[in-house]
Amino acid sequence: MHRLNHLLICILLATFTLTACSMKPTLPRNMELKAFDPHRKEFSCMYEVDHVPPVDPEAEAWFQEGMRV
């Protein structure tokens, strides 16, 4: 009986704790995404090679040494 009372108190405490938490009023649903538009009119293809800086030889040597270990 004591164990049942303890379990009931724990359940009530957990319930009151969870219901006391404030929740966001509404979730933003069906928002217009500015970052992704599959029907955009223009598309410019870019290659990563054109925008990445050249590899530092010392950094490449350290990387290769680390890969050997």
Image (cartoon, rainbow, N blue to C red):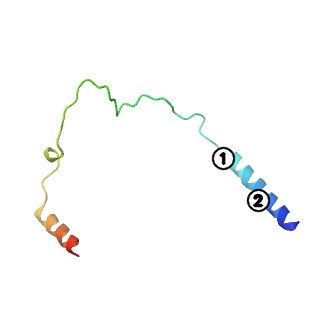
Question: In screen coordinates, is 45 left or right of 35?
Answer: left
Instruction: Name the image quarter holding residue 46.
Output: top left
Q: Which residue is mark 2?
A: 10
1 or 2: mark nearer the eye: 2
User: x%, y% of residue 8?
Assistant: 81, 58
Quarter of the image for residue 37 reads: top left
Q: Indicate the position of residue 41 as horizontal and vertical percent values.
A: 26, 23
For this rendering, which residue is in front, 14 or 38?
38
Q: Position of residue 48 (x, y in %)?
A: 18, 45
Tag 1's secondary structure?
Answer: loop
Check disc 1: other Cα within 10 Å, few if <14, some if 14-19, many if 20+: few
Please identify the residue farthest to the front as the structure is shown: 38
Number of marks: 2
User: Which residue is label 1 attached to?
Assistant: 21
Figure quadrant of the C terminus: bottom left
Residue extending farthest to the top is 41
The N terminus is located in which quarter? bottom right
Three-letter amino acid code of the residue under disc 1: Cys
Answer with the quarter of the image where residue 11 lies. Answer: bottom right
Dot 2: what SS?
Answer: helix
Q: Which mark is residue 6?
A: none
Look at the picture and state if 49 lies above or below 9.
above
* Relative to 67, 37 lies left or right: right
Question: Going from the N terminus, do you reach mark 1 or mark 2 first?
Answer: 2
Residue 10 vs residue 24, the one in the foreground: 10
Using a 10 Å C-alpha cutoff, classify the residue at mark 2 as few (fewer than 14 neighbours), some (14 to 19) or many (20 or more).
Answer: few
Residue at x-position 18% and y-position 35%: 45
Identity of the amino acid at label 2? Answer: Cys
